[in-house]
Amino acid sequence: MATLPLTLTRQLTTMEFDFLPNLPKSNLDDRTFNDLVDECLLRIPRYCPEWTNYNAADPGVTLIEMFAWLTDQMLLRFNQVPRRNYVAFLEMLGIRLQPATPAQTDVTFYLAAARSERYTIPAGVEVATERTETDEAVIFSTTHPLVIGVPVVRHFLTAEQAEDRPQELRDRFSSIWTQAADGHWSGREQPIFSDRPQPGNCFYLVFEPDEPLDGNVIAVTLRGEPAEATGINPDSPPRHWQAWDGHAWQPILRAETDDGTCGFSFDTTSGNEGSGIQEADVRLHLPMTWPATYFGNYSGRWLRCVYAQTGDAQADYSRSPTLVGIGAHTIGGMAHTHQCAIIRDEILGESDGNPGQRLQLQSGMILPRETDEHIIVNPPNGLPQVWQEVNDFASSGPEDLHYTLDSITGEIQFGPLVREPAMLRDDTRLRARIQGTPGQIHERSAADSTVPELATVQLMERQYGAVPPKGAMIRMTTYRSGGGNRGNVQAETLRILKSAVPYVAHVTNHQAAGDGADAESLEDAVIRVPRLLRTRDRAITAEDFEALARQSSRNVARVRCPQESTGNGHQGIVDLLIVPRVDTAPIEQAVGLSPDRFTLTDELREHVLGFLDDRRMLGIQVRIQEPNYVGVSVKIEVGLDPNYASQQAQEEIERSLLIRLYRFLNPINGGSDGTGWGFGNPVYTSDIVSLLQTVPGIRYLGAISLFVLRRQGADWVRTPITTGVIDPGPQGLICSWHNVQLRSGHSVSIVT
């Protein structure tokens, strides 16, 4: 019912099926260039006997070769007809190219001043990167309204040990602290830890539960006396700020510079020479979900500060800091954003009343539509109609207000009129009968009894989907355009507000954007079809789960389902190891891909799980996990040919070697086949030798040392390898990246 998408048609001339199984196929015309030339030469004596010189220098032979070449090109295109038919079959199966997916990140809006009442930043606010002479600005839009509340401290509690669900708590407010009109508390000095501080000592701040503070950035104002005698290092105090998100305690202090108290020491070495009571703010970025919770006998929104020992005796608290005042105010908030531009109320044109008419949106790469994104048709002298988007018109009747939208090209199509094969002939006969004179009609009816009646002709055609009335104005209420790898921007780059937002001073993204992926290519769609036909949209075997997980989102680059985890031996649990799609540009910059880039977002997890839930068997539970990433660092000595003794040549070869190593040792396009390092595959020293020995300019390879980096808690530990092999484990995955502190990068020493 739908025509071949323009994006498929454009790729027909360049598409190759070399990656598919080679089945026997007929060659519609197997003549080659030489066959055509020989055939023409054999015909010369018959048609032109006076032509006796057939050598290659003869002008006539040159003309024969030219026409043979043109004919050979036509035959080549003639033999490509089955390729077009293959794509037509894909279309009949309902295959469509998947559109690009947008990158996403959290953007922080900072207020110009604290607010005394709630303030809401609406959804759809656009922020962008800076536009340069060579690059267009990348636009992100907020997905939900951001409510900035007014934080009020309700309880100040201390505990001897930091528990996941605190029970033994001591109220420090009691009756000796008073609350001012602005919500700040003050009173006698109160210690926040034990008299002799021990690791695990902590204090809690419980905020009013009725005030929405999810995703807010607050400044907790603390008052106390300078306390250099506590013995800590003010630049790296031994404490952690955390907030309870309903499941676990999450860190909320983004950088040490956000702690103006310098670990409650109120350090005076930074220029504040005053004595007595000092006041400073601690800037905290609260979780996107910060629910009210009941712990012990107290209810509210919880955050805490935990004394965490650093291991350096000179950096620990020798005595407990004290506070004489606590308050809080909001300085901003975080909003989730997607890389897209929002277009509203776009006029598409006026309907001509014909079936199958097409209209074009001004923008391409349309993101999946939401509930308020649809077409409005305003008929002449009628009420506006809301039309519904469908994938195709197979189930659409003549009265159904349906249309299709190609997400890649932005083309909109209304329902076509389909006629039976004999319709054209019968319609011609009927028109001749109607347009003739009464006598002619009688004669024709008597002579040809097969002329159909009008009702019979109408039954031989079918309208799939309604047609907008002629003269009706058609508009698109809202749609979002964007997506692709270009949206994976770096941290601190989204700093431009596309439109002024009251009370907002500036914006930024503290984390790099991720999950952006380009639209699916025709080759990717062709590879996807055999998996689709095999699974029939149902997940039974491990291969089914892998294929459907890849099909669920363009953000999924690789999937691994352990063969033993198919629901039988693990009590109905299927584990999926997913590698998200990331931008591979850092590989060509000799930087590599850090494991932090492969962190699975909650949105991607939920999307894949939701897709599989509709296709799995009853009783099967699917768990989405990350592979066990293992870092590999290579140190190598290289001897160069004397012809490459210049400094420029050495630098170029060194960079080339680093790029080869980062390209070889990564989960996305690494390995010997360029499809990503295999799950569980070890790295041998011989692999590095085979990779580098063919580089031009290298005379010999010297000593090769391997180092492995494994995650231990929140840190990475680098260990030298003496056995010449790094085994990542059954579910491990090799990666390599450059980090000066971790010494994770590769090292190349040039020997001349």
Image: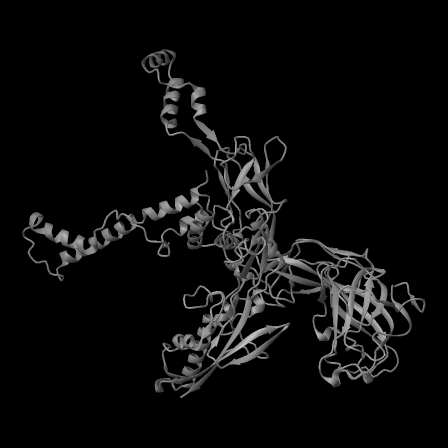
Viewed as shown, does residue 515 lie left or right of 149?
left
Is residue 111 at all visible to an observer of this figure? no
- Viewer-side residue, 176 vs 271: 176
| Whole-percent x, y for residue 520 in the image | 47, 54
Quadrant location of the C terminus in the rendered image: bottom left
- Viewer-side residue, 418 vs 391: 391
Q: Residue sitting at 90 percent across and 63 percent down?
A: 181
Task: Please state the total of marks drawn on the protein image.
Answer: 0
| Whole-percent x, y for residue 228 in the image | 81, 84
Q: Which residue lies furthest to the bottom in this view?
A: 752
Viewed as shown, does residue 596 lie left or right of 264?
left
| Whole-percent x, y for residue 516 in the image | 55, 59
- Viewer-side residue, 232 vs 416: 232
Q: Which residue lies furthest to the right in this view?
A: 175
| Whole-percent x, y for residue 615 in the image | 54, 47
Q: Quadrant of residue 511?
A: bottom right
Does 414 sit above or below residue 647? above
Q: Quadrant of residue 225?
A: bottom right
Viewed as shown, does residue 227 lie left or right of 545?
right
Does 81 sit above or below residue 452? below
